[in-house]
Amino acid sequence: MAEKRWVFKSAPEQDAIDNLSNSINVSPPIASILLQRGVDSFEAAKNFFRPSLDMLHDPFLMKDMDKAVDRVIKAFDSKEKILVYGDYDVDGTTSVALFYGFINSFHFDSAFYIPDRYKEGYGISKQGIDWASENGYSLIVALDCGIKSNNLVQYATSLGIDFIICDHHRPGDSIPEAIAVLDPKREDCPYPFKELPGCGIGFKLIQAIVSQRPRIKANPYDFLDLVVVSIASDIVPIVGENRTLAHFGLIQLNKNPRPGLKALMRLARNIKELTITGIVFGLAPRINAAGRIAHAHGAVDLLLAESEDEAYHFGEKLNVKNNQRRDFDSAITEEAVEMIANNVALIDAKTTVLFKNDWHKGVIGIVASRCIEKYYRPTIILTESEGKATGSARSVPGFDVYEAIDSCSHLLDHFGGHKYAAGLTLDLDKVEEFQKLFETVVSQTIADEMLIPQVEIDAKILLDSITGKFYNILKQMEPYGPENMTPIFMAEELYLASSLTVIKEKHLKFKVGQTNNTSTFDCIGFGFGHLAEEISQDMLFKMTFTIEENEFRGVTTLQLQIKDIKYD
């Protein structure tokens, strides 16, 4: 396991800590963590700890929302055929299920379309537009895609098909000439919150439609279980409006989820309260598996299922595909890591760009993430599809891989994505040139410290500070996720308060104490089994960790999950 950098978040001024601590009656470490996250007053703390749906922004603040609503309502009134078009990942399939589920409850001239990952590729496709034209659709509402589909929108217009685009990816140099383009990342969009997922944009459109057509009985908030699944799965910041949507979405997901999500929770054996982490590791891979292994149509069928029996039937199919996905993922990751290990130039590089023509296109994004776990640097995994090299990029914290790819755009057919994840397509004969240029661009722009894994520490604390009240306040800071991550603490002058146990030959378990403190806690360190022979009873060490509940034989206690250990 590579040595990690320990980085402390900037400490707030002591006066600010004391003022907030006294104002809302929390301990100084909690006040410090809140200040780091922008919670600096009683009112801000109230909004943070007690989100309200009233905090959601007016959807008409979004550029083109009025045009989008007018066009959709016109389609309703004239009984036009509406095609709901979305991407094949979790955000895309939840977006389609949300908007199609909404309009199909009262407008029966509608259908949904998901492109085939292998035959059509990402985003809007000519095949999809042709299908819409052949079947008499005059309006396409595209969700989680379309912001760079300028030529295809023009093509649709030439066939008499209007487009409404609901996207959250970065626009290109120009905006498609659609009827409406809803994307807070447009430079000319005044919408106050820029980080909604695609499903969140669809939710705002539903909000706006219902506000203008009160006789539509659908309740936008009934779709929040889908919205929170997209928020968690698309790794968007869980702050601002996303935090509010996620908060209420989790309540719905745990109390009254739609049959499809309930089936997935059952298949994932998630019997406890579902969290953002539970969605990311339990639900998202199963939804994604449909489009990775076969066709994402199956994921939308699951999410739209009206009965638990029907949903479980679809869910079992996704579970099988997810198991297949794991097999592909494991085999390709092993092959990719071996390619790096056997190439001196790749070992010493600041990037990883690998190409193999028979790798499974559906798992290359996962493989990129796995390679980063082993070789910590921006990574692109490419395979051959439809005579082109197509790939997925992943990055390390702090480095904008989208900008790096943009610097190589003259070699690409097209690309799109986010700061930390992107997709790209290029000619096969340009792969080697792209590898060299991407390495050059990243080498010139990435800071050396970004290439070393880091533990970002929220606060240094004493073990005696960790009480039931302390943990209960941490629980109220959920939902955790990007920009509101689970707090990581550091404690020093620690010692072993029990013997070490190695579980399954790789996980470490022991009880820890601290000099001049009376409290001791059980610790679990996943993947830290190798330290068992290095830590002795007579040594002091320091440790970074998160705090969690552990239930064993009906008894619930607090335990520390180890993030890293250092000792002299």
Image: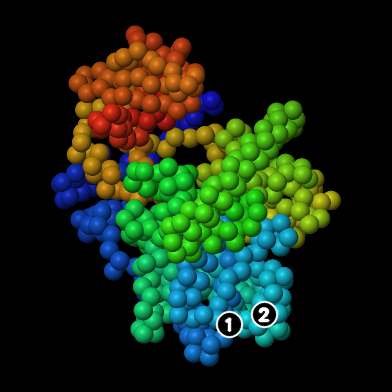
Residue closest to the eye, 8 or 129: 129
Q: Residue at x 59, y 54 (%)?
A: 290
Residue 383 lies, in percent from the top left, at 74, 47
Residue closest to the eye, 391 or 142: 142
Q: Is residue 181 left or right of residue 258?
A: right
Residue closest to the eye, 197 or 376: 197
- Numbered mark located on residue 81 in the image: 1
Residue 79 lies, in percent from the top left, at 53, 88
Q: Residue at x 38, y 26 (%)?
A: 524
Q: Quadrant of the N terminus?
A: top right
Q: Is residue 535 left or right of residue 385?
A: left
Tell me the kind of residue under disc 2: Asn
- Numbered mark located on residue 135 in the image: 2
Q: Is residue 406 above or below residue 562?
A: below
Q: What secondary structure is marked by label 2?
A: loop
The answer to whether mark 1 and mark 2 are in CB contact below 8 A is: yes
Q: Residue at x 46, y 12 (%)?
A: 533
Q: Quadrant of the C terminus?
A: top left
Q: Earlier in the sequence, mark 1 or mark 2?
A: 1
Residue 379 lies, in percent from the top left, at 64, 43
Tell me the kind of residue under disc 1: Lys
Q: Residue at x 62, y 65 (%)?
A: 114
- The alpha-carbon separation of the residues under discs 1 and 2 comes to 9 Å
Which class describes the residues within 10 Å of circle 2: few (<14), some (14-19), or many (20+)? few
Q: Is residue 455 visible to us here?
A: yes
